[in-house]
Amino acid sequence: MEEKLRYLSPLWKEAGFERLKTEIDPEKMHNVTTSMVDIYENCPGGGEKYLYLACEEGKVTDFQTGEGEAPQAEFSIRGPYQVFAAITRGELSSTRALMTGKLRLKGNMAKAVRLAPLADRVNKVLSGVSTLYEEEQA
């Protein structure tokens, strides 16, 4: 049985980055150059965490997770840990989460909506990592 990696942990990040580098087709990503940072609020154990992703010409070039100050990005998206976990598990689309107010965007909304299907493609790849999600902090 495959070991489950704790969501957003360094080992999960490494496994996710490897999958993204090998499974994301730059053409299906429309050869986009962009960056985004997701700020996870109400994380298990308290506090905030981040997930940062950068693409150049459709290739994932940087993928980070951590605590504290997140890297600067073209887009910043904030929301509860449980919402991002649902997106990564493939239970909720990022477009739906944005449009229903479950996530808050800082950046060009029109461009973000156009890029949302690409974010969903990234999350589909990440959903393939055997992941242990922690319960949300009460």
Image (spheres, grey):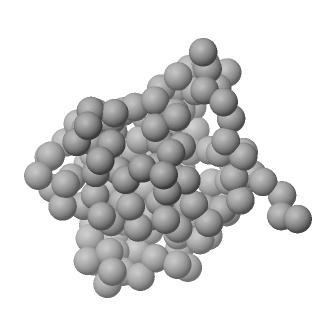
Residue 5 can be seen, yes or no: yes
- The x and y percentages for residue 15 are 67, 63
| Residue drawn where x is 21% and y is 52% of the image | 112
| Nearer-the-camera pick, 63 or 132 | 132
Q: Measuring 63% from the left and 54% from the top, which residue is drawn there?
A: 13
Q: Nearer the viewer, residue 12 or 42?
A: 42
Residue 50: x and y, percent? 49, 38
Residue 51 relative to residue 9: left or right: left
Locate the C terminus by quadrant. Answer: top right
Q: In this orientation, which residue lies closer to the viewer: 10 or 24?
A: 24
Q: Residue furthest right?
A: 1
Which residue of the protein is positioned furthest toward the front in this rendering? 91
The residue under the point 35% across, 50% down is 94
Picture quadrant of residue 113: bottom left
- State whether residue 57 appears in this view: no
In-front residue for pair 99/74: 99
Q: Is residue 27 above or below residue 108?
A: below
**Is 76 situated above or below 45?**
below
Image location of residue 123, percent across then percent down: 47, 59
Quarter of image, res 70: top left
| Residue that appears at 52% across and 34% down | 82
